[in-house]
Amino acid sequence: MTHEEASSMKAVVVDACGDIEYKEVPTNHLKSNEVKLLIKAAGICSTDIDRVYGSKSYYYPIILGHEMAGEAIELGAM
């Protein structure tokens, strides 16, 4: 299977305050004007730490990491 056909990805997921796990999660189909990235690096910041151990998350589960670098591998309809 190529990365374009992948139906899941690995992610750091917070299911509840203090409950963090590295696991496989399903990927979504691309919508119009969206891009699928093959992530090469991702970082976390103090906001992510607050989401794990504090009360800064508006909902759970939440996938951490929003400072990313990667390669565009698929485009949604334009």
Image (tube, rainbow, N blue to C red):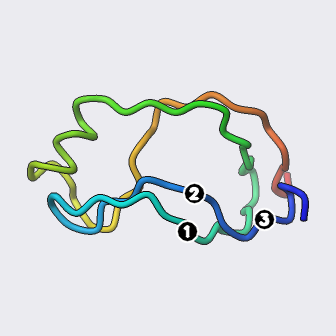
Residue, disc 2 = 10
Mark nearer the N terminus (1 vs 3): 3
Residue, disc 1 = 25
The N terminus sits in image quarter? bottom right
Q: Which amino acid type is shown beneath numbered disc 3?
A: Ala
Tell me the residue at 63%/60% (across/down).
Answer: 9
**Based on the displayed image, in which of its 4 quarters is residue 76 positioned?**
bottom right
On the image, the x and y values in percent for residue 64 come to 39, 47
How far is the residue under mark 2 from the one under mark 3? Answer: 11 Å
On the image, the x and y values in percent for residue 59 come to 25, 65
How far is the residue under mark 1 from the one under mark 3? Answer: 11 Å
Q: Which amino acid type is shown beneath numbered disc 1?
A: Val
Residue, disc 3 = 6
Tell me the residue at 63%/28% (across/down).
Answer: 69
Q: Nearer the viewer, residue 52 or 23?
A: 23
Tell me the residue at 61%/71% (across/down).
Answer: 26
Q: Nearer the viewer, residue 57 or 31?
A: 57
For the residues labelled 2 and 3, say whether their Cβ atoms are less than 8 Å apart. no
Q: Which amino acid type is shown beneath numbered disc 2?
A: Lys
**Based on the displayed image, in which of its 4 quarters is residue 8 positioned?**
bottom right
Element at label 2: strand
Tell me the residue at 85%/51% (across/down).
Answer: 78
